[in-house]
Image (cartoon, rainbow, N blue to C red):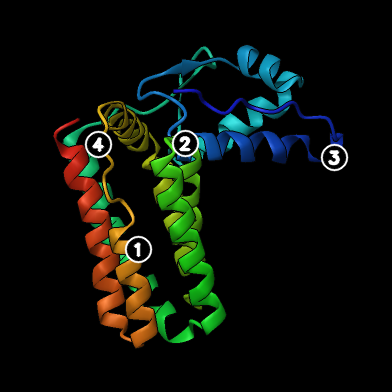
Amino acid sequence: MKQPALKKVSARVTVQDSVYGQLRNALTWGMFEPNQVTTIASLSAEFGTSHMPVREALRRLAAEKGLEIAHNGSARVPPVSRERLDDLCRTRVTLEGLATELATPRMTQQDIEECLALAKEHEQLGREGKIYEMLRKNQEFHFAIYDRSGSEVLPELISTLWLRFGPYMRLLSDLVARQLDEGVIHPYSTFHYSIIDAFREQDPAKAGEMMVRDIEATRTLLQNLC
């Protein structure tokens, strides 16, 4: 399974934010293995930058609990465990279910059509075996909803949870890759379409419930992998 490469950073004004943004996305999408160790020197070489923006990006990500920094300055992706998975998912269903409920009455017809297009793209990318593109589209679908919740706090908190969920997304991407190799295509978009139906019906409780079921379905898949 080919992973997207980190891109060279050239514009000096945005070097620090670019390094941080790329690393954060890579962690969120599960591009790094649980327990994987990386160094400032290796990341600096990959980005084509000095050590300073990488060091600062790692510091910020460690503050968000997306990485663990060792005494020698190397960074480690947090390990996975059943307990941590359950803890993250309990928090996710609470916040993401609420954000979905709040977003439902604010969804315009155009918003709903945009969500439908994202759900279809997500499904098609899965069928084509483009795992990381599929995970990125899944994130776009979810945050297209959370960003319409009317809350300034919820999307930010949920984004941090997704960062901490990154090691489990790596487990999920590996599982999907194995299933595709075996000719198995799991209907990962099922609940996405149910959420969209709830938006059309203007039913906040149903939309929130379908979001919770989407998260719980992923949790069930991952529990046996931890």
Q: Report the residue marked by disc 4.
A: 184
The earlier-in-sequence mark between 3 and 1 is 3
Check disc 3: other Cα within 10 Å, few if <14, some if 14-19, many if 20+.
few
Asked if marks 1 and 4 touch (Cβ < 8 Å), the reply is: no
The earlier-in-sequence mark between 3 and 4 is 3
**Residue located at (85% from left, 35% from top):** 11
Q: CA distance from mark 1 to mark 2?
A: 18 Å
Label 4: element kind: loop
Q: CA distance from mark 3 to mark 1?
A: 38 Å
Instruction: Where is residue 191? Give x, y as percent.
Output: 29, 62
Query: Which of labels 4 and 2 is toward the front?
Result: 4
Q: Nearer the viewer, residue 4 or 86?
A: 4
Query: Which of labels 3 and 4 is toward the front?
Result: 4
Residue 192 numbered mark, or none: 1
Instruction: Where is residue 124? Give x, y as percent.
Output: 44, 49
Label 2: element kind: loop
Check disc 1: other Cα within 10 Å, few if <14, some if 14-19, many if 20+.
many
Q: Report the residue marked by disc 2.
A: 130
> What amino acid type is highlighted by mark number 2?
Lys
Check disc 4: other Cα within 10 Å, few if <14, some if 14-19, many if 20+.
few
Q: Nearer the viewer, residue 215 or 178?
A: 178
The earlier-in-sequence mark between 1 and 4 is 4
Instruction: Where is residue 195? Give x, y as percent.
Output: 33, 71
Q: Report the residue marked by disc 3.
A: 13
Check disc 2: other Cα within 10 Å, few if <14, some if 14-19, many if 20+.
some
For the C terminus, give its image quadrant.
top left
Asked if marks 3 and 1 touch (Cβ < 8 Å), the reply is: no
For the N terminus, give its image quadrant.
top left
In the image, is residue 142 above or below residue 109?
above
